[in-house]
Image (cartoon, grey):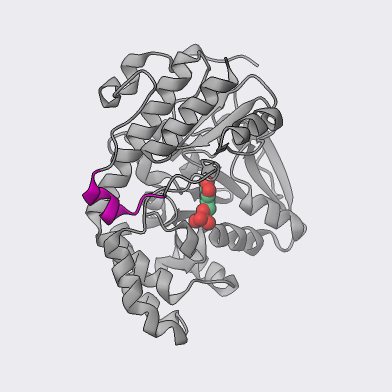
């Protein structure tokens, strides 16, 4: 496989060296106030850096709101969604009928997949990418037309477009992509979605959208607003730190939103709805999460630079790097040192995805990976 060397970051200059206390890649410890407000995970025997969770949260503010809603645990959640729908409609700049709340965005992906392929047909998707939609749709009889990522491990938009046929029911695009962390150039992304949506439904998985630092990077909600055949999914699991509560949402044209809404099964629950509402107003936690994620990501870059391991610039809360040994072997070695890393993402068997963690978890990671390569 050929790689464009510009895609690889090796320079310490790019890694925000100011946030490091030492060459070990140790980042500033949290203050007592940050610990009480932002609920960092304590350092466990096994640092969980395998699922791209936010190691902080729920924040004190969100926990307080959830405590208050305990008493409503005897109620069905449906009427509790109205205030959240209002907030999300305002956030996305669309009327409420464009929003579908789901049990995590995983439910959004699964439900959208079967809504559009249950009578057969195929989904076009990159390999590797986030699999929830495709795995589920395949169980219901859909085909998946896999398109390998290009030599820069980026979505191959040209090839994806070429594969569109009458059998295509959906094109799935995860941007930034999981597990690569890559972000499509804004103009190419928008052009692809706009053109493709004339032929089939485009699904834009924007689980990591909030981590994008490029100014004015477009969400495909822009095309939803223009009435295009585009569906966008977002989640409260990442920057908002609510992965365990299971809440996400879809933004789509009302006719598409309606079809998807009819197939929602899990939906979500009262505590998650209350938490999500509060988290949208908790700007302090949001900014803190982004800042800590950047520091942790810089510390991962620094460590990989020191070890001369290649990696991709990430626009998310994880980094994909070439470990140079089969992931099963690498995963076990890291586990022995108290760190859980991501699973295999075929065909990249000698690559590893590592999520950002707290300063203590990052220090554990740094020591663990150094010990693997001594
Ligand atoms: C790209 C992508 N989409 C969706 C999800 C699902 O997240 P959730 O179901 O927690 O919203 C994930 C989780 O890792 C993801 O990486």
Total of numbered circles in the picture? 0
Quadrant including the C terminus: top right
Out of 374 and 16, give the one closest to the viewer: 374
Q: In the picture shown, does residue 64 fall above or below 216?
A: below
Quarter the N terminus occupies: top right
Horizontal and vertical percent position of residue 29: 29, 37
Q: Position of residue 153 (x, y in %)?
A: 56, 26
> What span is in magenta?
31-41
Q: Residue at x 36, y 67 (%)?
A: 275
Q: Is residue 89 visible?
A: no
Extreme residue in the bottom direction: 74
In the rendered image, the vertical position of residue 179 relative to residue 98, given as above or below: above
Place of residue 356 in the rendered image (x, y in percent of width and height, measured from the top left): 44, 38
- The residue that appears at 40% across and 37% down in the rendered structure is 360
The answer to whether residue 39 is visible is yes
* Residue farthest right in this picture: 141
**In which quarter of the view is residue 22 placed?**
top left
Q: What residue is drawn where x is 59% and y is 45%?
A: 130
Determine the main secondary structure of the stretch shown in magenta. helix
In the visual, does 282 lie left or right of 219? left
> Which residue is nearer to you in this view: 329 or 138?
329
- Would you say residue 321 sits in the magenta stretch? no
Which of these two is toward me, 37 or 115?
37
**Magenta region includes residue 38:** yes
Judge left or right: residue 17 versus residue 54.
left
Q: Is residue 252 above or below residue 361?
A: below
Q: Where on the picture, by quarter, is residue 227?
A: bottom left
Residue at horizontal 32 percent and vertical 39 percent from the top: 292
Above or below: residue 352 compared with residue 306: below
Q: Residue furthest front?
A: 45
- At which x and y percent is residue 82? 35, 77
């Amino acid at each position: 496989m050929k790689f464009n060397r510009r895609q690889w970051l090796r320079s310490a200059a790019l890694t925000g060296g100011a946030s490091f206390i030492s060459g070990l890649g140790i980042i500033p410890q949290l203050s007592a106030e940050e610990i009480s407000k932002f609920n960092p995970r304590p350092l466990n025997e096994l640092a969980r850096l395998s699922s791209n969770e936010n190691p902080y949260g729920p924040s004190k503010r969100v926990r307080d709101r959830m405590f208050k809603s305990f008493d409503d645990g005897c109620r069905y959640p449906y009427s509790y969604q109205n205030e959240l729908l209002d907030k999300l409609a305002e956030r996305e700049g669309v009327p409420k009928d464009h929003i579908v709340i789901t049990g995590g965005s995983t439910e959004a992906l699964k439900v959208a997949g079967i809504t559009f392929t249950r009578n057969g047909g195929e989904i076009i998707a990159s390999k590797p990418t986030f699999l929830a939609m495709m795995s589920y749709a395949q169980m219901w009889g859909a085909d998946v037309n896999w398109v390998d990522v290009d030599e820069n491990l980026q979505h191959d938009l040209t090839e994806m477009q070429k594969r569109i046929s009458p059998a295509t029911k959906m094109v799935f695009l995860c941007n930034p992509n999981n597990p690569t962390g890559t972000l499509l150039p804004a103009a190419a992304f928008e052009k692809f979605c706009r053109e493709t949506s004339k032929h089939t439904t485009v699904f834009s998985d924007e689980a990591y959208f909030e981590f994008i630092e490029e100014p004015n990077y477009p969400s495909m909600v822009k095309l939803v607003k223009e009435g295009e055949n585009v569906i966008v999914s977002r989640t409260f699991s990442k920057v908002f730190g609510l992965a365990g509560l299971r809440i996400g949402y879809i933004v789509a044209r009302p006719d598409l939103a309606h079809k998807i809404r009819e197939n929602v099964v899990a939906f979500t629950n009262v505590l998650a709805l209350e938490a999500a509402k509060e988290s949208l107003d908790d700007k302090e936690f949001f900014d803190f999460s982004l800042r800590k994620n950047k520091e942790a990501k810089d510390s991962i870059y620094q460590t990989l630079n020191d070890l001369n391991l290649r990696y991709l610039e990430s626009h998310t809360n994880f980094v994909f790097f070439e470990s140079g040994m089969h992931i099963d072997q690498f995963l076990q070695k890291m586990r022995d040192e108290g760190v859980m890393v991501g699973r295999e993402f075929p065909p990249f068997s000698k690559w590893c995805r590592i999520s950002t963690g707290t300063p203590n978890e990052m220090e554990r990671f740094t020591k663990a990976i150094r010990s693997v390569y001594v």
